[in-house]
Amino acid sequence: MTRATPPPALAALMAAVAAGGIVAGGLLETGLPAPPGQWLFIVMCMVTPAIGWLVAARRPDNVYGWLLLAAADCLGLGALGASILINLPTDRGPLAGIATVLASLFTVFYGLTWVVIPLLFPDGRLPSRRWRIGIWVAVVGITAHWAGLLLSTDMVYTVVFSKGNPLGLDGVAGLIAAAVSAAGQFVTFLVALSVLVSLVLRWWRSAAVERRVLRWMIIGVVGTLGGFVLMTLFPPDDYSVALGLLASMVTLPAAIVATVFRHGLLDIKVGIRGSRIFLVFDLRPTVDELLTELGPGLEEAEPVEQLGRLAGAVQAGLETRWAAVQLADGTRVVAGDEDGEAVLTVPAGLGHIACGPKDAGRFTAEDRRLLGALAVPIGLAIQNVGLAARLVNAQEAERRRIERNIHDGVQQQLVALIAGLELARATGGGTETLTLLREEARQTLTDLRELAAGIHPSVLSQGGLVEAVEERCSRLPVTTTVTTDPGLRARRFPDEIEGALYFTVSESVANALKHAEASRIEVRLTQAEGRLQAVVSDDGKGFDTAAAGRGRLGTPADRMNALGGGLQLTSGPGEGTSVRAWVPVPA
């Protein structure tokens, strides 16, 4: 089932809500005119909704952008709620309750930025299945922190909000809620420390390229957690609170911005042209761009070399350490250094494509779409490799057949003729001997002509396809009918087309005589709709095509495929056999 992709308008709406909450909350807190420091704080807090909107709008299938927007909304709405609580003239009423709920979203913001966003960087997936438990523990901790804080006693709120908690519980219940909140916060912080340790271990085990990416995320997590520690453990003076808030809310988004733009993750990068700075999107080449770039080289390359270049295109397009194209017989063509198990494998025609780990990050849905699109031309290339190999084998088999026929037939006749001539010269052979030797020479010449006709009949070169087929069928021992379209007899086609169709007809009628025990054969040559077609039908005993495979007409089929045509075999026990072969020709 395909996951539905959220619309870009939703990303814009979420970013607008976050930005509006940040601006309104900041200005409500200080009033107008706001001091420069407050404006600076507002601008820096805008980093989270900005990068979240950018990623979600450009890559809506990547859940990471939506996580950033969710965190930004919690930040913006939390700031708005906190500012309303600070400025409310009374601690009761509907607005006070709404403001308390909004302010409590700060706990969700911290949970997302401490645990979820670092852990799922950069493609929105967990590093391993084992982290599923960690995520559930974090969710329980964040929920306990949020619910407990929402219902905590006034004692917890008066540190920041002088009027207390409009929704707080009194007495022991309020203290229990505060304890639950503190326990949830502690659990979330422990999971965040585990995430930091996991990032450091991943950095330690990774290659240089991935290390540079993870380094920024580690810095962001250290800054975020360090800001919280600064606000919690040190005296709450203006300096420590401001620095702690700034580190908690800005360090991680800034690290994500640096990673995305500096290393081109998520296909977004900053470009500089003269005095202008601009964003470059879609750094990843499309399939059309890759094939356009490869096109001239593929046309000139041999089939196996084509596979090598396509494997290189997969490696470059997906930025993997290695990529391999494997044929059905196990042959592998590898681009890069294959140093481990394949991470992603997709079928491609009669083979498949295997990819090693990415240089940085993991495979995304966009990577899989690109690889699936590249599988089409790679599958065709694999098919061409198999076709070329079969044609080479067929040519080699034909060469051996001709060599065997010459050795066993004409060569022996020539040896005998030479021996007879030597004997006649030595004995002074008379008229009878010379007549016998002349007949042997004529028979040898006839055999040579028949052998040459099997290689490429002279009537095909001189008279064309129709005359060659008629001449071939005129010597058959069964009733054979050849019919053609009007005007086709006078048409000539390229040698490779006429040769391919002639030998397909020749082999088809030979099979009808040898295997089908046919008493009647019909051959029809037609040209229509840009196709030159030959159909050979017989009334023989037929056979099961599924059981026979492609053995009988494998070589003619390869010839047709090599010319862009095809061959279709229709038969059944007791139903005769029909062979239809066609190639494209100009109208």
Image: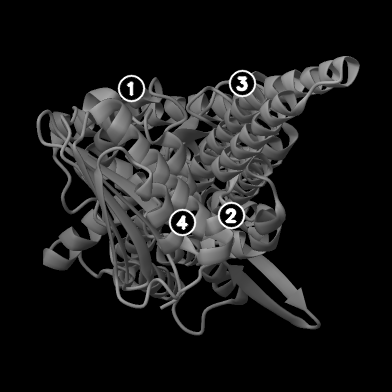
Residue 526 makes an appearance in the image: yes
Q: Amino acid at mark 2?
A: Ser
Identify which residue is drawn at 36% across, 36% down: 510
Q: Is residue 516 left or right of residue 417?
A: left
Q: State whether residue 404 is above or below residue 451.
A: above
Q: Is residue 21 left or right of residue 205?
A: left
Residue marked by disc 3: 340
Q: Is residue 156 left or right of residue 499?
A: left
User: Where is residue 500 shown, x and y percent of the image?
Assistant: 49, 51
Residue marked by disc 1: 133
- Quarter of the figure with the N terminus: top left
Of the numbered discs 4 and 2, the one sitting upstream in the chain is 2
Identify which residue is drawn at 51% across, 84% down: 33
The residues tagged by marks 4 and 2 sit, at their Cα atoms, a distance apart of 8 Å
Q: Nearer the viewer, mark 3 or mark 2?
A: 2
The residues tagged by marks 3 and 1 sit, at their Cα atoms, a distance apart of 28 Å
Q: Residue furthest right?
A: 426
Between 469 and 564, the one lying in front of the other is 469
Q: Amino acid at mark 4?
A: Ala
Badge 4 crowding class, 10 Å Cα cut-off, few under 14, some 14 to 19, many 20 or more, is many
Badge 3 crowding class, 10 Å Cα cut-off, few under 14, some 14 to 19, many 20 or more, is few
Answer whether labels 2 and 1 touch (C-beta < 8 Å): no
Of the numbered discs 3 and 1, the one sitting upstream in the chain is 1
Q: Nearer the viewer, mark 2 or mark 1?
A: 2
- Helix, strand or loop at label 3? It is loop
Q: Amino acid at mark 1?
A: Ile
The residues tagged by marks 3 and 2 sit, at their Cα atoms, a distance apart of 58 Å
Badge 1 crowding class, 10 Å Cα cut-off, few under 14, some 14 to 19, many 20 or more, is few
In this figure, which colouring scheme has been used for the structure? one colour
Residue marked by disc 2: 458
